[in-house]
Image (spheres, grey):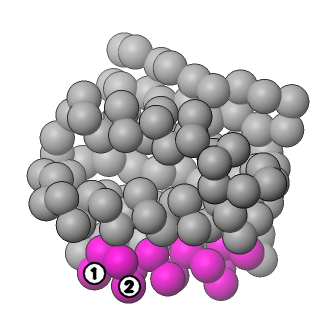
Amino acid sequence: MTITEIREDDYCIQYDSSLTTVYFEGKLSLRDPSEYSPITDFLENVVSSQSGDLTLDLQKLEFLNSSGIRVLSKFVSNIRKNKIDIQLKVLGSKDIAWQSKSLRNLQKFMPNLVLAIE
């Protein structure tokens, strides 16, 4: 099992290779997409290291600003556009308002994305 992470004061992103899951936690409100580049690189490294299923677990991500939503949308879009052999699943929480509204839009970028908002 390999767990890698990005940890800052307001958020933590961890990848558990044994579960093929990236866990997001906290509040992500960086100023613009360029500040999200370490996260973008992290996600791209995860994708390049595997095939099959990948889960993004956002259930504990309390806040994601519009720049972060754009970065997440672009990530999903790039998987589809580059025909990467990954079945992407996104887990959200119905108790976090932004997730119910914004995560459904990811299916526009990748129609076969599995979305579970629980």
Q: Is residue 46 visible?
A: yes
Q: Quadrant of residue 58?
A: bottom right
Q: Amino acid at mark 2?
A: Lys
* In-image side of 86 versus 66 (left or right): left
Residue 93 percent across, percent down from the top left: 65, 66
Label 1 with label 2: CB-CB less than 8 Å: yes
Residue 96 got which mark?
Answer: none
Q: Amino acid at mark 1?
A: Pro
Q: Is residue 5 above or below residue 115?
A: above
Q: Dot 1: what SS?
A: loop
| Extreme-top residue of the structure | 1
Q: Quadrant of the N terminus?
A: top left
Q: Which mark is residue 111?
A: 1
Q: CA distance from mark 1 to mark 2?
A: 6 Å
Which residue is disc 2 drawn over? 108
Q: Position of residue 83 (x, y in %)?
A: 13, 60
Quick one: 102 or 77, which is closer to the camera?
77
Q: Which residue corresponds to the image point at 65% horizontal and 84% vertical from the top-left?
A: 101
| Bounds of the magenta segment | 98-111
Check the picture and name the quadrant holding the C terminus: bottom right
